[in-house]
Image (cartoon, helix red, strand yellow):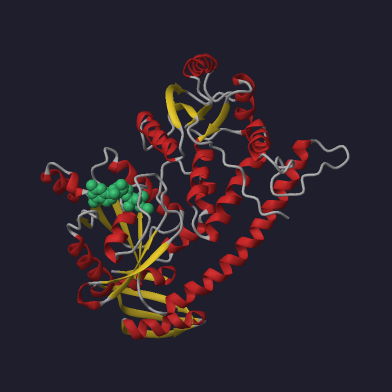
Amino acid sequence: MTKKQPEPTIRPRERAFLVGAEIYGQAELLTLEDSLNELELLASTAGLQVVGQATQKLDAPNPATFIGPGKVEEVKALVEETQAEVVLFDEELSPRHLRELEKIFGEKVRILDRTALILDIFAQHAATREGSLQVELAQYEYRLPRLTRAWTHLARQAGGGGGRSGSVGGVGLRGPGETQLEVDRRDIRRRISHLKQELEKVRTHRQQYRARRKRSQIPVVALVGYTNAGKSTLLNHLAKADVYVADQLFATLDPTTRRVELPGGNLALFTDTVGFIQKLPTALVAAFRATLEEITEADLLLHVVDVTHSNAKAQAESVHQTLAEIGADHIPVLTALNKIDRLMDPEKARSVLESYARSVAISALRGDGIADLLQVVNELLYETYTQVMVRLPFTEGSLIAQFHELGQVERFEQQHGGVLIQGRLPGRLLARYQAYLVSQG
Ligand code: GDP
Ligand code: MG
């Protein structure tokens, strides 16, 4: 089987017309306008040229065309006027929406949605083998039910040479009575199962690596935050690491870990993660397990917030939601309010600071506040002890041993199948005992 990457959805410098909708009663963190601004930034990150936009408020999505029929006509006229080649919807379209809209807009215009765009950007930026495999899998899973003109047609056009380039990574020869669509579907299913096997192998390998790192006992600090908040810049500053920094969405896809010395000589591993974003489809979140697993196993989360962003609050909220979704909400969070060098009014920074439980104001770019930040990280990881009671099964022998080694045991009782320990644990270890916690504080 050939190892062919899926055709990119976006071709450089295509003219794109954006369509956003607000559904009444649907709780959204971003306003329609902000969401469209974000879509525009996403589009330009992918190399599209945005030529116009239209919006609509709806009680419910139209089952056939997502937006209402009147709005469809309006958009169609605007698309002709602006000579747009792509109509980009801010919401994920169902396979039916896609088919109906393609019929209406005709041969010359392609219909895309936010998810397809994000997948394309992810594909451009995946750096490790696991990252690339994950994106490719997510792309095919997204495309399989949507195999209409937008994909098959495009693939055949863009492929050039090779003759059979319309088929996706497979043999692509038509069996008796098989339509081209059926061939494409069969090829994609085959490719999906192959990708899953490959991913399993890569994961086993990574787990061994992580287990080794865990044994090294150096606590892990995961940088989380909305995309473009400044996570990579901060990691660069901390470790003088050469992590790709760009004013683009999703410049980082794969986790990058650096060793950092804290005040007093203690060590911590800081790991950069993919940016969080509104309306990141849950299926996609699940696809990026590599990055997300780093987060759920961290000892501390460093939440980087761009305080100068007009939507800082909503962005922070969406990060918290995603953390809860992936089961990382038990890990202690320290908030870094970033880009204070851009704040005209220092009073404002102070008032924002007060609204976060535990926060430090920094400029990742200039280095302001970094020393304070590391001081707090050090306190949280190494100097804060918490009173806990845990019930550990004998199968967790290493956790039992670790409590004795790094914590202070005040009471120790054998119980059926395990032990009950009461005592004090360093803050950085709390997350590891979370599943066995009886009481805390
Ligand atoms: P990430 O998506 O969270 O990894 O964000 P990046 O680290 O790639 O930064 C996104 C953009 O914000 C880049 O253009 C950075 O130069 C810029 N940036 C990051 N930190 C700061 C800061 O403290 N001050 C200013 N003015 N810009 C910053
Ligand atoms: Mg980054």
Q: Residue 13 appears at what percent x and percent y?
A: 47, 33
From this view, report whether residue 370 is shown above or below residue 413. above
Quarter that holds the C terminus: bottom left
Residue at position x 51%, y 55% in the image: 288
Q: Is residue 311 left or right of residue 195?
A: left
Q: Residue furthest front?
A: 161
| Camera-side residue of 433 and 272 | 272
Q: Is residue 348 left or right of residue 102?
A: left
Quarter that holds the N terminus: bottom right
| Camera-side residue of 82 and 217 | 82
From this view, report whether residue 302 is shown above or below residue 430. above
| Camera-side residue of 268 and 382 | 268
Question: In the rendered image, which quarter is residue 236 located in?
Answer: bottom left
Residue at position x 40%, y 57% in the image: 273
Number of numbered tags placed on the structure image: 0
Q: Could you tell me if residue 265 is visible in this image?
A: yes
From this view, report whether residue 430 is shown above or below residue 118. below
Residue at position x 88%, y 40% in the image: 176
Question: In the rendered image, which quarter is residue 130 located in?
Answer: bottom right
Q: Residue 81 appears at what percent x and percent y?
A: 48, 15
Q: Is residue 106 left or right of residue 255?
A: right
Q: Residue 408 appears at what percent x and percent y?
A: 30, 83
Q: Residue 155 appears at what percent x and percent y?
A: 65, 38
